[in-house]
Amino acid sequence: MSLRSQLLKGVLEGCILSIIHKQPTYGYELSVRLQEFGLSDVSEGSIYPILLRLQKEKLIEGTMQKSEVGPKRKYYHLTEHGLHALQEFKTQWENIKHPVDKIIDIEEE
Amino acid sequence: MSLRSQLLKGVLEGCILSIIHKQPTYGYELSVRLQEFGLSDVSEGSIYPILLRLQKEKLIEGTMQKSEVGPKRKYYHLTEHGLHALQEFKTQWENIKHPVDKIIDIEEE
DNA sequence: TAAGCTACCTTGCGATGCAAAGTAGCTTAT
DNA sequence: ATAAGCTACTTTGCATCGCAAGGTAGCTTA
């Protein structure tokens, strides 16, 4: 398991919550969106289990909808509970990001 | 296991490498240094296993040294291999940090 | 001599990302 | 028609990591 995969732990879940919050999205599109944002090579084997887990925890809800150009899609949207989880993620992310950035830049002291 | 713990995966190891690189340090002091930087409540149960793992992977080397005010301390310093690992961590951290910050801030689009 | 700090080590658990393998609908080329 | 290729979702099991919990022991001070 790569360093990148370790660093993504918890992060990926938060990113998915954030993207879905902005606009209801389905799994396959998430991999495209993540790539656009710079998180390339996030496989479906990562995304779908997260979606199922988030649904199980009642943070998101999914509904199947017909597509006019392909197979049916499962669109997910955030619940009230999921919104809180997103805010909690943002807080924790900032709480870690700032110390880490400081620690990384201690060379020019 | 908390969200914070998940977000720290891989991160803590990188931070420890960075602190040791700046100046050879021993385990107990690391918990103090991390706290000063804003990573509070990082327990010894997290730090010592990481140090042993890093040593096993030849990224750091430790030597026992007498202290004039307490028990002996095991000071660690980075190896050549460890310096490469630190640089790799910095790169990966930036590669993830920037996309995540973008994804988190998509609300005001 | 007891308390309290310093300093180190070990074990086992829970959570997560992810590769791998599978199913199936739809579109386009042959 | 039918094969190829894309879209789209699911499941299983593994590897890894942070960390709580519990333990050992030296040193200093009350």
Image (cartoon, coloured by chain):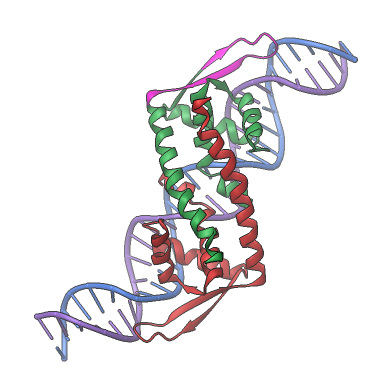
Chain colours: A red, B green, C purple, D blue
Q: Which residue is drawn at the image coordinates 48% and 25% (left, top)?
A: B21
Where residue B20 appears, as percent x and y from the top left, is 52, 25
Whether B74 is among the magenta residues is yes
- As rendered, which of C13 and C29 lies closer to the eye? C29
Residue B12 image point, x, y percent:
54, 38
Residue B12 magenta: no
Q: Which residues are magenta?
A: B63-80
Residue B3 location in percent, x, y? Answer: 61, 52
Residue at 44% x, 60% y is A46
- Is residue B1 in sight in this rendering? no
The answer to whether residue B8 is above or below residue A106 is: below
Measuring 46% from the left and 84% from the top, which residue is drawn there? A65
Q: Is residue D20 above or below residue B78?
A: below
The quadrant where residue A84 appears: bottom right
Tell me if residue A15 can be seen. yes
Q: Is residue B3 left or right of residue B93?
A: right
- Residue C29 versus residue B3 in the image, above or below: below
Q: How many marks?
A: 0
Residue at the image position 40 percent from the left and 65 percent from the top: A31
Q: Position of residue B94 (x, y in %)?
A: 45, 44
Name above or below for residue D25 compared with residue A82.
Answer: above
Question: Which of A7 and B94 lies nearest the eye of the viewer?
Answer: B94
Residue A39, image quadrant = bottom left
* Pick the front one: C9 or A2: A2
Outermost residue toward the front in this view: B109
